[in-house]
Amino acid sequence: MRLLAFFFSLQLISLAPAAGADLYLKYKLYALGLPIGSGVLLLNVNDESYSLSANGQTAAFGRLVSDGRGSAEVRGGVRDRNLQPEAYSLDIKSEDDSGSVAMTIRSRDVKKVAVDPPQDRMKERIKVTAGHLKNVLDPLSAAILPAPNGLKKESCNRTLRIYDGKERYDAHLSYKSTRTTKTADRRFKGKVIVCRVRYEPVSGHRPKRKAIQELAANKSMEVWLAPVGSKPYLVPLRAAISLPFGSLVVEAEKYKLSD
């Protein structure tokens, strides 16, 4: 589940289309080419505010992904096209990771966090300091990238400072290529930019944990970013990683803008 959360910063997803959403994206999750989950991202954004919501389920796939359901949502303001999250919540129920997170954020500084159940093995974890909680995004908001220059190289080149209520990490994006693609429903047909992604753990994690070390060392991660209609934002259309057993891919099959 850490891989899913890092790729899309969405965690578990799958909603029915909501009237009035600026963008409706339905995703499928594949492992070794086999579908093991599906989901939807709902986005509303204007010059003053935004909201994102997601929920859904995954099917068990070996030791990598377990059966699970979850929901997440965030709302906040917009300042100079930059998202300013204010309230974020996540609820997950699965075989190996169940619980909830609620955060209050102001000017990208975390003001309050509630985690249930609390993290374990705290002595083994890198301490999350007050400095780590400044100028951050929640995982859901980090999926929507402001891009006033559209599909340009510089829209890829950035670092996302993310805090999920338990762990602080950076996602380093860098330009790889530009390509043309389409969704299965053909509602999106056009250019996307492909960004390399590198995960860097900062705090809240257990540095000796093998999964953390392998994810930080992985150089195969990439995300395809597509425009949100005429709005100055980009959204993930596809994300992929190569693992010892094969590939893990999250890919949008439906893309629907509001009328």
Image (cartoon, grey):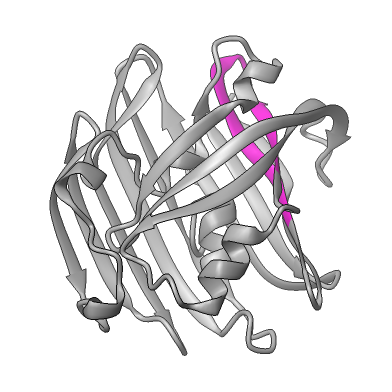
Residue at (38, 73) in percent of width and height:
206
Front residue of 222 and 122: 122
Front residue of 86 and 178: 178
User: In the rendered image of this protein, does residue 169 appear above or below residue 144?
Assistant: below
Taking the magenta stretch, the answer to whether it contains residue 238 is yes
Location of the C terminus by quadrant is top right
Relative horizontal placement of residue 223, taking residue 72 as reference (left or right): right
Taking the magenta stretch, the answer to whether it contains residue 252 is no
Front residue of 77 and 56: 77
Relative horizontal placement of residue 103, taking residue 37 as reference (left or right): left
Relative horizontal placement of residue 175, taking residue 77 as reference (left or right): right
Residue farthest to the left, as pictured: 112
- State which region is magenta: 223-240
Q: Position of residue 200 (x, y in %)?
A: 50, 51
User: In the rendered image of this protein, does residue 51 appear above or below residue 239?
Assistant: above
User: Quadrant of the rendered structure where residue 186 is?
Assistant: top right
Residue at (30, 72) in percent of width and height:
125
Q: Position of residue 154 (x, y in %)?
A: 63, 17
Q: Does residue 238 show up?
A: yes
Q: Position of residue 258 (x, y in %)?
A: 56, 28
Relative horizontal placement of residue 139, taking residue 232 as reference (left or right): left
Q: Does residue 1 show up?
A: no
Residue at (29, 39) in percent of width and height:
75
Magenta-drawn stretch, dominant element (helix, strand or loop): strand
